[in-house]
Image (tube, helix red, strand yellow):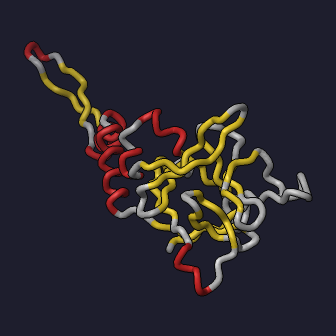
Amino acid sequence: MVGNSLSLQGGMTMECCRVCTRCLIPLFLFLFYSETDAFRLTKMQSKRPVYRIWDVSQKTFYLRNNQLVAGYLQASNMALEEKIDVVPISPFNNTMFMGIQGGNRCLACVKTGDQPVLQLEEINIADLAKAGDQAKRFAFIKSHPGPTFRFESAAYPGWFLCTSQEDQPVGLTRRTSPWDHAQDPITTDFYFEKD
């Protein structure tokens, strides 16, 4: 801002400021965040990225009896691999919605009994952005503890996407180390690559 004097009647002057456009743009973005964020989110949804996901044991995701499972797919059945559709929610903390089958079925964390479980819900991933707090069960926070990624439930902090033995359902766990229980190896580390 640059100060200028404005002459008034009677010889009085008043200090005024010129606001540069460089200052106005961030101010308008702050004041009208919801509109600009909605525009950004809509723009990102139109170019929704699709990813391949597999755990550190090389198990990929596929559907079996309408359930998302992880297993070793060979060349003859690689077409069964489920790609992950992603809609970023916040670039600041890597929060995202994750879906399969073109984003028409989404991964959700739902409490059953004492703990949350992972389930697939028939909802279009593009509709989740408009659902507000109702969509929290679909949100995951992606972290990057090295060459792999972890996906923590936003609705249930401390619960991570996991795989266990071959051809078993993809689930949620509190354990992040595969050595917590040697008889039941749990994996929370995944490779996540744009397709």
Q: Position of residue 184 (x, y in %)?
A: 85, 57
Total label count? 0
Q: Nearer the viewer, residue 27 or 35?
A: 35
Q: Nearer the viewer, residue 129 or 109?
A: 109
Looking at the image, which residue is at 45% across and 63% down? Answer: 101
Image quadrant for the N terminus?
top left
Using the rendered image of the protein, determine whether residue 1 is visible from the camera's viewpoint: no
Residue at the far right in the pictured view? 182
Using the rendered image of the protein, determine whether residue 18 is visible from the camera's viewpoint: yes
Q: Nearer the viewer, residue 36 or 4?
A: 36
Looking at the image, which residue is at 67% across and 61% down? Answer: 149
Residue at the far left in the pictured view? 9
Residue 48 located left or right of residue 90: left
Q: Position of residue 42 (x, y in %)?
A: 32, 52
Residue at the far top in the pictured view? 10
Q: Quadrant of residue 129?
A: top left
Residue 183 located left or right of residue 44: right
Q: Nearer the viewer, residue 171 or 90?
A: 171
Residue 106 located left or right of residue 38: right
Looking at the image, which residue is at 58% across and 67% down? Answer: 62
- Reply above or below: 11 against 21: above
Residue 171 located left or right of residue 67: right
Q: Quadrant of residue 186?
A: bottom right
Looking at the image, which residue is at 65% across and 43% down? Answer: 117
Residue at the far bottom in the pictured view? 75
- Reply above or below: 182 against 113: below
Q: Position of residue 128 (x, y in %)?
A: 41, 45
